[in-house]
């Protein structure tokens, strides 16, 4: 019972933070734009409010994943970890002045985290991972989670760009969108996220090959996760090459980005869901 209350408390903290951010954005979005002192004070308050659920969520993840000697990392912990890292990276980015215009998105991220923090309760880890003491495995897992988190932020970024582009010709714009950077600036941010995520994804695949070679004597086992992992890598590589050689931007870049993200989700989360929930393996 105490464990369930802990999860519910973290979810309520996220829910309160998301509600508060959404309310202040809707009520004071335009006013804050004209009052620098109020904007700075409001940003500091939002950072403080978000710190509590982030810390609570991190503690819950640590207890859930390291409950036994082996690492428990089922689909519930995987989803919860990715969303927590996404929220944490986004929260840290708020300290950078060039990215503060994006902090209005902390409301939907908080509300998503309020649901994701409960994922280990709904999908508990049944089969702990083996060989987690190996350094190459730890590096592989860390790179994978960071890559997933950055690509999650990039996907949200791409969706936001799509909404903003469609509303450029409308006079009535939501206060959620009024303080965002120009589209060209957001596009540069998007490709920085993609580049960083691509490097981490490359490290993930490389460390996975090394780990598999050391453990099973086989560099690239043909599995659902491996296949979709390399397909997503190829999509992101094509996007970056297209950007460099042909200047891909706008809708073309967003479509490639979102396609790669969906395939990446199928690579790990999708495979774990099928194996653990559907096949019970």
Image: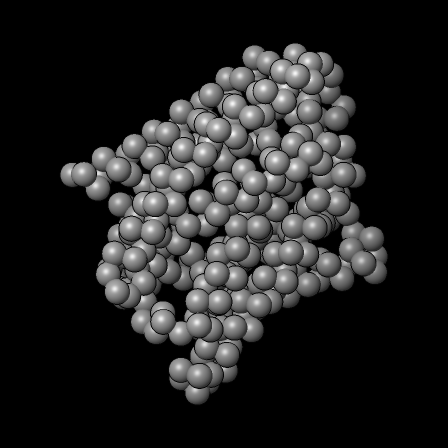
Corner quadrant of residue 175: top right
Residue 203: x percent and y percent?
57, 68
Q: Is residue 160 visible?
A: no
Quadrant in the rendering for residue 11: top left
* Quadrant in which the C terminus appears: bottom left
Instruction: Check the image and report above or below for 23 versus 228.
Output: above
The residue lying at 40 percent from left, 82 percent from top is: 215
Q: Would you say 61 lies left or right of 188 here?
A: left
Q: Position of residue 194 (x, y in %)?
A: 66, 53
Picture layout, residue 174 above or below residue 70? above
Query: Looking at the picture, how far across and down is residue 75, in whole percent?
Result: 35, 55
Q: Residue at x 26, y 45 (%)?
A: 121
Quadrant where the image shows the N terminus: top left
Q: Is residue 88 left or right of residue 277?
A: right
Residue 193, x across and y down, in percent: 65, 50
Could you say which is closer to the camera, residue 27 or residue 56? 56
């Amino acid at each position: 019972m105490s464990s369930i209350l802990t999860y519910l408390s973290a979810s309520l903290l996220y829910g309160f933070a998301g509600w508060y951010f959404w309310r202040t954005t809707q009520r004071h979005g335009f006013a804050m734009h004209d009052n620098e002192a109020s904007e700075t004070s409001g940003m500091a308050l939002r950072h403080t409010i978000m710190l509590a659920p982030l810390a609570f969520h991190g503690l819950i993840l640590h207890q859930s994943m390291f409950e036994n000697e082996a690492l428990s990392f089922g689909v519930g912990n995987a989803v919860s970890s990715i969303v927590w890292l996404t929220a944490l990276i986004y929260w840290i980015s708020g300290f950078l002045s060039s990215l503060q215009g994006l902090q209005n998105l902390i409301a939907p991220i908080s509300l998503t985290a309020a649901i994701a923090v409960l994922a280990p309760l709904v999908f508990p880890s049944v089969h702990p991972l083996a060989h987690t003491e190996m350094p190459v495995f730890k590096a592989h897992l860390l790179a994978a989670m960071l890559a997933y988190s950055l690509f999650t932020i990039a996907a949200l970024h791409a969706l936001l760009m799509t909404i903003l582009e469609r509303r450029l010709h409308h006079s009535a714009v939501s206060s959620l969108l009024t303080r965002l950077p120009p589209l060209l600036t957001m596009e540069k941010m998007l490709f920085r996220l993609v580049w960083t995520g691509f490097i981490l994804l490359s490290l993930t695949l490389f460390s996975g090959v090394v780990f598999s070679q050391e453990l099973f004597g086989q560099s690239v086992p043909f599995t659902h996760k491996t296949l979709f992992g390399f397909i997503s890598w190829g999509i992101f590589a094509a996007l970056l090459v297209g950007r460099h050689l042909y200047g891909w931007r706008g809708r073309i870049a967003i479509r490639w980005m979102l396609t790669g993200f969906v395939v990446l989700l199928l690579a790990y989360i999708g495979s774990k869901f099928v194996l653990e929930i559907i096949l019970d393996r």
